[in-house]
Amino acid sequence: MSKPAIPLVVEDISPFARALAREISDAAGPPSHLTLMNMVSRAAGFRNFQHLRAARMAGERLANPPAPQTIDHLLVERTLNQYDAMGRLRQWPSRRKIQDLCLWPLWAALPARTLMGEREVNARLRALHLFDDPAILRRTLFSLGLVSRNPDGTDYCRREVSPPAEARALIALLEARRRGQGATPPAA
């Protein structure tokens, strides 16, 4: 596998040449390959060659951002149908994929970095669903790693994780529904 090319661009050749000449004159003999690369990098304004390489690679990543995640709009729509006009979960879905996606808006409604007892979590979950079974929601949130708790089942805390694209879309739609504005799904 070939090594990636690392371009070196200098704004003005004169200060670069002076800095490089100073680096070479301070050396105690002919510099090695790595020493020469570090000298050239320092003359161009970097700390060393690794700094130059890291800066160029970061520039390439920023210039070519990753492709946006595609959203399964059908899954989001099916999951959205599980909620009423007030944004409350009407029933516990039978399909696991929809169950998992249904939990993300509940996760988003829990306060971040706040310890809560089981009763407080149950009260918050009761306000977000209509089938009166906060235990299944609480346990499934824990089993998916969306909340943490002590081994004895006390002190629940929402874990800060990044929701998948479908969950972000569902959360946005439900927030708009709760505000009574109605929303269209975000573009993929």
Image: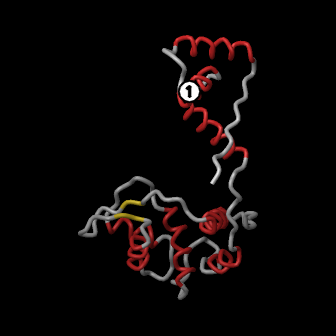
Residue at 37% x, 60% y is: 157
In the image, what residue occupies the spot 70% across and 67% down?
Answer: 70
Q: Residues within 10 Å of mark 1 (few under 14, many from 20)?
A: many
Quarter of the image with the C terminus is bottom right
Pinpoint residue 187: horizontal percent, then vertical percent: 76, 63
Q: Quadrant of residue 68?
A: bottom right
In the depicted structure, whether residue 179 falls above or below residue 59: below
**Residue furthest front in the image:** 30
Q: Residue furthest bottom?
A: 94
Where does the N terminus fall, quadrant-wise? bottom right
User: How far from the left and from the top, in percent, is residue 158?
Assistant: 42, 60
Front residue of this view, candidates 112 and 58? 58
Q: Which of 132 and 50 lies nearest the eye of the viewer?
A: 50
Using the rendered view, name the quadrant where residue 79 is placed.
bottom right
Q: Nearer the viewer, residue 57 or 68?
A: 57
Residue 127 horizontal side relative to residue 85, left or right: left
Which residue is depicted at the point 42% across and 81% down? 133
Q: Which residue is mark 1?
A: 38
Residue 174 spot, x, y in % from top left: 63, 67
Give the residue displayed 63% in from the left and 69% down from the top: 166
On the image, the x and y values in percent for residue 66 come to 68, 55
Q: Which SS class for mark 1?
A: helix
Q: Amino acid at mark 1?
A: Asn
Residue 82 vs residue 159, the one in the foreground: 159
Looking at the rendering, which quadrant does residue 10 occupy?
top right
